[in-house]
Amino acid sequence: MTYVVTESCIRCKFQDCVEVCPVDCFYEGENMLVIHPDECIDCGVCEPECPVEAIVPDTAGNVTKWLEINRKFAEAWPNITRKGEVPGDADSHRDESGKYDKYFSDKPGKET
């Protein structure tokens, strides 16, 4: 089992999860984070830290798409080990649905 980041993270990217991850398995895209499934140790400490409930176990229903997205972009995006700047409009996107089709970006986040 691993944890995955889902659509709820898009345009929110609060990053509270990054601070608690003991193995630094988060990777940053332009407008969301992903978890590298081969690095995640399934400890689950990140899940309750996410204020938008974007992190779920890969055993949750309908997350196959997100497992593949996490795997693909964890290989392409830079590793993030510290909480960075939260997007200024994050709260306005908190409860929005359909964010993948509207906003998803495959561009990497800024390397620090």
Image (cartoon, rainbow, N blue to C red):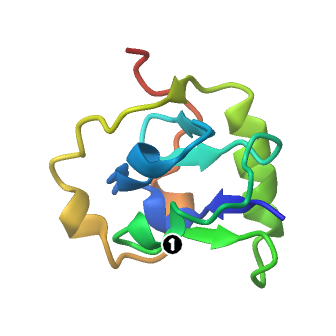
Disc 1 marks which residue? 98
Which residue is painted at 79% across and 63% down in the image? Answer: 65
Which residue is painted at 83% across and 42% down in the image? Answer: 38
Q: Nearer the viewer, residue 68 or 47?
A: 47
Residue at the far bottom: name it.
61
Is the residue 10 above or below the residue 22 in the image? below
Residue at the far top: name it.
112
- Type of amino acid under label 1: Gly
Quadrant location of residue 97?
bottom left
Is the residue 60 above or below the residue 105 in the image? below
Query: Where the C terminus falls, by quadrant?
Result: top left
Quadrant location of residue 36?
top right
Quadrant location of residue 77?
top right
Numbered marks: total: 1
Which residue is painted at 34% across and 79% down in the image? Answer: 95
Q: Position of residue 63 (x, y in %)?
A: 76, 72
Q: Position of residue 13 (x, y in %)?
A: 37, 51
Is the residue 70 above or below the residue 48 in the image? above
Query: Where the N terminus falls, by quadrant?
Result: bottom right
Label 1 crowding class (10 Å Cα cut-off): few <14, some 14-19, many 20+? few
Is 106 left or right of 17, judged from the image as shown?
A: right
Q: Secondary structure at mark 1?
A: loop
Q: Nearer the viewer, residue 73 or 21?
A: 21
Which residue is painted at 50% across and 35% down in the image? Answer: 28
Q: Position of residue 88 (x, y in %)?
A: 15, 48
Q: Nearer the viewer, residue 79 or 8?
A: 79
Is the residue 10 above or below the residue 75 in the image? below
Is 27 left or right of 103, judged from the image as shown?
A: right
Residue at the far left: name it.
88
